[in-house]
Image: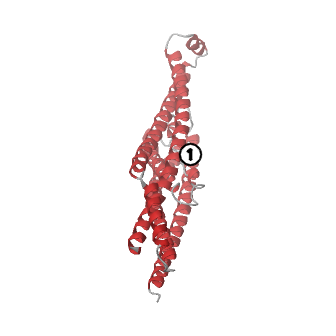
Amino acid sequence: MADDIEQRLTSAAEALREYETTTQRSADLRRRMDEMTTQLAALRARHAREQKDVEQLEGLSLTRVLVSLRGARDDTLARERAEADAARYRVTEAEGRLEALRREDAATQARLRQLAAAPSAYAAVLDDKERHLDGSDDPRRAPLLALADERGRLNGELHEVTEAMQAARTASHALSQVRDKLGSASGWSTYDTFFGGGAISSAIKHSRLDEAAHAAARADRCLVVLRTELTDVPGMALTAPQLAVNGLTRFVDVWFDNIFTDLAVRDRIKQAEQNIAQSMRLVRDVQARLEQRAAQVRARLAMIDIERRNLLTQG
C-alpha cells in the first residue's frame, strides 16, 4: 500500500507542477500577444500613412505639384516608396511574431486541457496519504511520502530545464548563422565602401543582407520559443525579456542606396553584428545557468534515492 501511494504521489506531484508552470506560461503568452497586437496595430497605421504619402506623389495632388516644382520628385518618391516598403516589412515581421505566439498559446491551451484534472488528482492522493498515515504507526511513512512528493516536483522541473536547454541550443545555432551571414555582408560592404565596389559587389552585398535578414527572422523566432521555455524554469523569468534580436530583422532600412550611403549601410551592419554578439552572450549565460540548475536537480534526485533507500533498509 505504501509503495502504491508513493508512486501515485510522485506522478501526481509531477503532473501538478506541470499544470502550474503551464498556467504561468499561458498567462505570459497572453500578455505578450496583447503587447504584440498593440504593436501590430501601430505598425499597420504607420504603413497606411507611408502608403498614402506614396499615392499622393504618384497621383495628381498638391503634394506632387509642390515637390515637382522643387525638381526633387523622383528622389522624394523613391524615398517614400522605400519608407512604405520598410513599414510593410515591419508589419509582416510583427504578424509573423504574433502568429508564432498564437501557435505557442494554442499548444499551451491544449496541454492545459490535458492537465485539467491534475490539481484534483493531487488532492485525492494527499487524502489517501493522510488516511494511510493515520492508520500506520511506522515513523518512516511520513518522510517516505514527503520524498516522493519532492521527487515528483523535481522530475517535472528537470523536464522543463531540459526543454529550455534544447531551445537555447537551437537559438544559439540560429544566432551563429546570422553572425556568419553578417560577416559576409560586412566584408562586401567594406569593399563596396572603401575600394570602389560596383554593381556586382553591391548586388552581392544586398544578397548577403537578404540572407542575413531571413536568418535573423528565424533566430528571432527561436528566441521567442526560448523565452517561453524559460518562464517554466524557476529563477529564469528575469532573463527572458532580454532575449530578442531588437531591430535586427529590419534590414530593409539598408537596401536602398539612393537613400543611405554605403558608409551608412556599413555602420548599420556593424550595429547588427554588435546586437548579435550581445544576444549570443545572453544565450550562453542562459545555457550555463540551465546546466547548473540541471546538475543541482539531478544531485538532489540522487540524494532522495539515497535517503529513501536508507529509510527502507532501517530495522
For this orientation, the residue located farthest to the bottom is: 315
127 with respect to 260 (left or right): left
Image point 47% across, 87% down: which residue?
Answer: 314
Image quadrant where one finds the N terminus? bottom left
Residue 34 coordinates in the image, percent (x, y): 54, 38
The reply to whether residue 66 is in sight is: yes
Q: Nearer the viewer, residue 188 or 114?
A: 114
Residue 168, visible in the rendered structure: no
Q: Name the residue carrying label 1.
A: 246
Callout 1 crowding tier (Cα within 10 Å): few <14, some 14–19, many ≥20: few
In this view of the protein, which residue sits in the foreground, 44 or 126? 126
Q: Position of residue 275 (x, y in %)?
A: 57, 51
In the displayed structure, 135 sits above or below 15; it is below
Spot occupied by residue 51 in the image (x, y as percentages of width and height): 51, 22
Residue 12, percent across and down?
A: 43, 62
| Along the line of sight, the residue nearer the viewer: 52 or 75 | 52
Furthest residue in direction front, as rendered:
135
Q: How is the image coloured?
A: secondary structure
Q: In the rendered view, would you say 161 is above or below 24?
A: below
**Residue type (three-letter) at the residue carrying disc 1:** Asn
* Left or right of residue 195: residue 9: left
The total of numbered circles placed on residues is 1
User: Helix or strand or loop: what does disc 1 sit on?
Assistant: loop
Foreground residue among 166 and 57? 166
